[in-house]
Amino acid sequence: MTTALARLWLTIWRWRAVVPETPLPSRCVMIAAPHTSNWDFPLTLALARVSGVRISWLGKRSLFRGPAGPVMRALGGVAIDRSVPGGMVGQLAAEFERHERLVLVVPAEGTRSRTEYWKSGFYRIAEQAGVPIACAFVDRRTRTGGFGPVVVPSGDVAADMDLLRSFYAGWDGLKAGRSGPVRLLDEEAVAPAAPAD
């Protein structure tokens, strides 16, 4: 998607990009939230393009076969093979070792329907790869989208999630009522124990 085409697309749909206050890291995991519609994908591509942010996204390996492959890769697609031992987290962490620049977008909710918990993959990938987590958002009410703060995983999952909760509070996805709470199922289970007195 060219910058001119992205600007035109946003103008037609009456959306405005919120440009990050500071440049994003060249290597990071980017949360895409709230994720409530198939339209999140082209909207995020357009917002990133006009903001000068080059993003990569996840796709099943089958999407990259045949003539569609070069198009998917040109749009920033990263092919994932779910059958590989070690799982997706290991594959994606390894991608960072192969790239000097990689902003990998992960829809933390893992579904377009309302869910009570986010998937923890974005956090595990960032931890394993040793890269920060950047925030991306869309907000239906203000018709804005863009990129927010960067969180460096500290190992204290609950504290890191508190930072993400603070940023994402109040944003409303493209489909009303589909955004769930910003929390992980295992936040408390994996949080470090309090130091002994």
Image (spheres, rainbow, N blue to C red):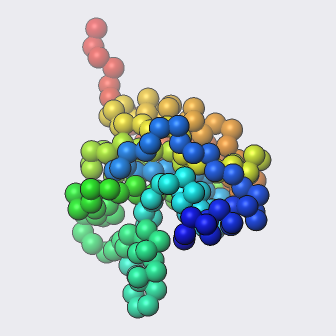
- 38 left or right of 104 in image: right
Q: Position of residue 173 (x, y in %)?
A: 68, 52
Q: Is residue 108 visible?
A: no
Q: Quadrant of the C terminus?
A: top left
Number of marks in the rendered image: 0
Q: Quadrant of residue 112?
A: bottom right
Residue at 50 percent of width and 32 percent of height: 163
Q: Quadrant of residue 155?
A: top left
Residue at 22 percent of width and 57 percent of height: 97
Q: Position of residue 56 (x, y in %)?
A: 42, 63
Residue at the outermost front position: 4
Q: Position of residue 142 (x, y in %)?
A: 75, 46
- 164 left or right of 103 in image: right
Q: Position of residue 161 (x, y in %)?
A: 47, 36
Residue at 44 percent of width and 42 percent of height: 23
Q: 108 or 24, which lies in front? A: 24
Residue at the outermost bottom position: 66
